[in-house]
Image (cartoon, rainbow, N blue to C red):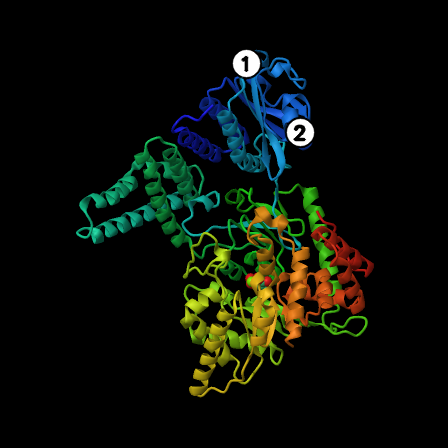
Amino acid sequence: MAPEPGAPTSMLKSLRRIVQEVVSAPDLPETLAIIVRRVREVMRTEVCSVYIHDPVTDRYVFMATEGLNKALEGRFSLGLGEGLIGYVAKREEPLNLDNAEAHPKFKYIEGSGEEVFKSFLGVPIINHRQVLGVLVVQQREPRRFDEDEEAFLVTMSAQLAGVIAHAGAVGSYRGKPRDPSRRATEFPGVPGSPGIAVGRVVVVSPPSDLRSVPHRPCADPEVEVGLFQDAVQAVREEVLAIREELSGRVRPEELTLFDAYVMLLDDHALSGEVIECIRGGVWAQGALSQVVLRHVRTFEMMEDAYIRERATDLRDLGRRILAQLQAGSRGRLEYPERTVLVGEEIPASILAEVPEARLAGIVSVSGSGNSHAAILARAMGVPTVMGVVDLPFAEIDGAEIVVDGHDGRVLVDPAPELRQQYLEAMEAERADARQMESCIDLPCVMTDGHAVKLLVNTGLNSELMRTLGRGAEGVGLYRTEIPFLMRERFPTEEEQRLIYREQLEAFAPRPVTMRTLDVGGDKALPYFPIKEENPFLGWRGIRVTLDHPEIFLAQVRAMLKASAGLDNLRIMLPMISNTLELDDALALLSRARAELCEEGWTIATPQVGVMVEVPAAVYQAGDLARRVDFLSVGSNDLTQYLLAVDRNNARVAALYHAYHPAVLQALQEVVRAAHDVGRPVSICGELAGDPGAALLLVAMGYDMLSMSATNLARVKATLRRFARADAAQLLAEVMHMDTSRRIRGAVEDCLRRGGIAVRPRG
Ligand code: PEP
Ligand code: MG
């Protein structure tokens, strides 16, 4: 049947409306109830039901219905391939029948009331390749559902799959009727930094974000009511002041917005509701966010466009009041012993705020294993799980949590036996780390006498202390953007000079490789936001600093001045994708040095290098190397760009393989090209800190490996157990393999043969 004119728009509207309503449902049963009710209405069918997979029994449970016998909800189930439902789940395809009973797979369920419904359309609900359940509509009239109806249900199911998975996970935490598809209190994510931590959740919420206000009880409701009223008064004054300032400059009708704001503030219903909620035992910020978000959701679901618009005003007002409340409570956050920071995102600045001895773990809802938050966590040796997308983080403030940074999962409120098991695993890990530490001061020499230079990646101050004397031969990557991220404005040239001097002095006479500012991608400076559709393919690294020579010049001048008399500075340029960028950067560098000499400084010429992070730089490695003193491979970015896998996106984390054959070939090619023109080459991505990869990199000919300080001992202990010939043999073997899985398997076998423990993959 041809679609009616205008049908796509109304279909899209219905889809959006249903998804919006479902997203705000408090738990899984309500989510499913809304789905069956709304889908039946929109499709004008007589029945809509949903079946959800129970992994424990491996059966599809009849969970919600409109039109069949509700008394059977949760009471019967079908196995894979059993009945029409099991058949849809097995084939992972829609099934559209005009006479269901006539199908050989049809199975009658006693008491369901199904016997009168002839036509049947079932579609699988699939999330991340897993069949979560089946969505079904049925009609008395014996007819096939038409193409549009089928397409609508398929689209609906695809959109709802993620929401159902999320609601199931969240519901299991809240102790609501159990979602059969999840184990209670366990939330999967992506490994961020290895190790296990058992600690207390401290929720990190970005300022003025209503959605991430943690749920907390309040000790003294009257104090909280007072705080709330003060915040409302401050916002009222703020709004009136803006109105005053604009009056005379804009048309009177535009000022009505501010009148509407003041009316909303004066609205006793809203304030009254918040106060009532506070008196019910919720702290002011939580009460405000609950009330405002509830009204926003109601407004957003209205048909009337004008009312829908008011949701934006209400949200804006809510944010302003929240900002006032947060400003009043700043500095009151206390970090318990064994703090586990949990948030939508974990900004670098917060890591500096928590006393080091108290920071036990990190959990981030967004991001992935090679996000910069995870790299920082690894540098600090803090167990971390990233991309825990289903975690209802605002609701678990103060809860006990297990962070399993190896397998990438967290457990909220673990049962005592489970908690004990993790504590024991933590102790065993500590003993293992102590054993690895024992070789830290020994030279990194392989059994045949081949010496390998190991360096560290730095950026954090605490890390500096940690790495001193830890057996590194210098710094292979100092991420200068980290001190930039910790501030509220660009640091001045003199402030930078002092920071850089501290680094250079700490390691002198060993070399310190400072990378020029590498912002953009997932590293946004709070005071220099870059908003882009595709930040990793956008304005980042050298592209930003070449467009802002004043920032670049101030930075390299600070580096050069800091190196006076120490002469251990090396400068490295990030994200170079063509030779012109390199030539421009080199010209700016020479200019900075010449100016300093004119100003009377005596500064040795530092070695300058290029980071090989994009595929273009691999193909042009020779041209780039010829112009500079060294190359250094940034394997984190190189892997993301070669495999077209966003390093910050948990959804594609399983595709991010630094052991991918294409990555290994690129790595080998860079060494060949650099050595052909007589330049040394190092690697400073996370791969260098992987003991198995270190063997491959040494065999490829990498002159230096630079890694997180926490990996140094393990890599050193590994290299000291093998001869270079063993590494060469392993490399020859894996270079013929065509999948990263086989390569990893071969590397792990080799490590085991050398007596190095390898964790089984979870
Ligand atoms: C890299 O990309 O490998 C690298 C070392 O730089 P960063 O991780 O800071 O992007
Ligand atoms: Mg990089």
Residue type, mark 2 in image: Lys
- Badge 1, how many Cα within 10 Å: few under 14, some, many 20+? some
Q: CA distance from mark 1 to mark 2?
A: 25 Å
- Badge 2, how many Cα within 10 Å: few under 14, some, many 20+? some
* Residue indicated by mark 1: 142
Secondary element type, mark 1: loop
The reply to whether dot 1 and dot 2 touch (C-beta < 8 Å) is: no
Mark 1 and mark 2 lie on one chain; the one further toward the N terminus is 2
Q: Residue 286, located in which quarter of the rendered image?
A: top left
Q: Is residue 227 shown to the viewer in this render? A: no
Residue at x 32% of width, y 42% of height: 313
Q: Is residue 261 above or below residue 304?
A: below
Tell which of 301 and 5 is nearer to you.
5
97 relative to 761 in the view: left or right: left
387 relative to 234 in the view: left or right: right
Q: Is mark 1 within 8 Å of ligand 1?
A: no
Q: Residue furthest left?
A: 248
Tell which of 229 and 178 is nearer to you.
178
Tell which of 102 and 592 is nearer to you.
102
Estimate the x, y position of residue 456 in percent, counting from the top left.
Answer: 63, 69
Quadrant in which ligand 1 is drawn: bottom right
Secondary element type, mark 2: helix
Estimate the x, y position of residue 650 in percent, counting from the top left.
Answer: 57, 48
Q: Is residue 678 shown to the viewer in this render? A: yes
Estimate the x, y position of residue 174 in percent, counting from the top left.
Answer: 56, 36
* Residue indicated by mark 2: 90
